[in-house]
Image (spheres, grey):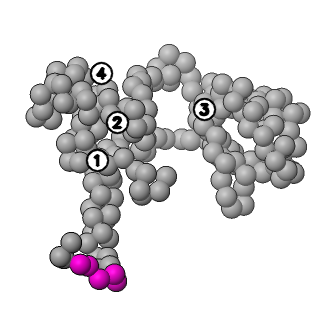
Amino acid sequence: MGNANRPRLDKMDLKILSVLQRNGRITKLALADEVGLSPTPCYARVKRMEEAGIIRGYRAEIAPEVFAPQIIVWTEIVLRSHRYEDFAHFEAAVRRVPEMVECWAVGGGIDYLIRFDVPSIEAFQEIMDGNLGRSFSINRYYSYIVTKKIKHDSDRDLSARIQEQLRGAAQKAEARPPSPLPRNDAE
């Protein structure tokens, strides 16, 4: 998305996003109170950000390890062939395997980086040997078993990052040289 097409956010929008990121279940009234707006304009801002795709949704963060064993395995995959059809076939199959909870197409020495959430190493290996091993021409894969969670995406507050980007964009706009076209102040 180019800079011209990016939705414009002000400090109040960032404040709303920060609160919603910490507590997606907050009531409209409590959100408005926390950010210092009346409910109607606060809700209008939230709706605008939802419609612009800034707010994608509201979810509960489930801890599956509480009720069942869970092992996270990150796997690098390189396909044998790099034709469009091979990539499309692989990506369609990934969407059908529920244990593959994230899949990223990446540049560099590998084709995909995949996160598996599985109950055991054996379950992971069955997926690799079964579904993927037979269905695709995987040239090679490397797997990394997660031993400890250090930081997770939901731990970050995006408003500080957005605020920094806004500051950078404003500084660039101020630093632009004046237009070379002469102005006619008489008009």
Q: Is 116 in front, or is 69?
A: 116
Residue at 81% across, 37% down: 89
Quadrant in the rendering for residue 56: top left
Residue 183 in sight in this render: yes
Question: From the viewer's perspective, is residue 122 above or below residue 76?
Answer: above
Most common secondary structure along the magenta stretch: loop
In this view of the protein, which residue sits in the foreground, 48 or 114? Answer: 48
Q: Do the residues labelled 1 and 2 touch (CB within 8 Å)?
A: yes
Quadrant position of residue 75: top right
Residue furthest to the front in view is 187
- Please say if 29 is above or below 181: above
* First in sequence: mark 4 vs mark 1: 1
Which amino acid type is marked by label 3? Val
Q: Mark 4 points at which residue?
A: 25
Give the mark toward the camera: 3 or 4: 4
Q: Label for residue 49?
A: 2
Tell me what residue is drawn at x 16 percent, y 24 percent. 39
Q: Nearer the viewer, mark 3 or mark 2?
A: 2
Distance between the Cα atoms at labels 4 and 2? 16 Å
Q: Name the residue under label 1.
A: 9
Give the class, few, some or many, for how many residues have Cα within 10 Å of label 3's Cα (few <14, many ≥20).
Answer: some
Residue 156 location (% of width, % of height): 35, 44
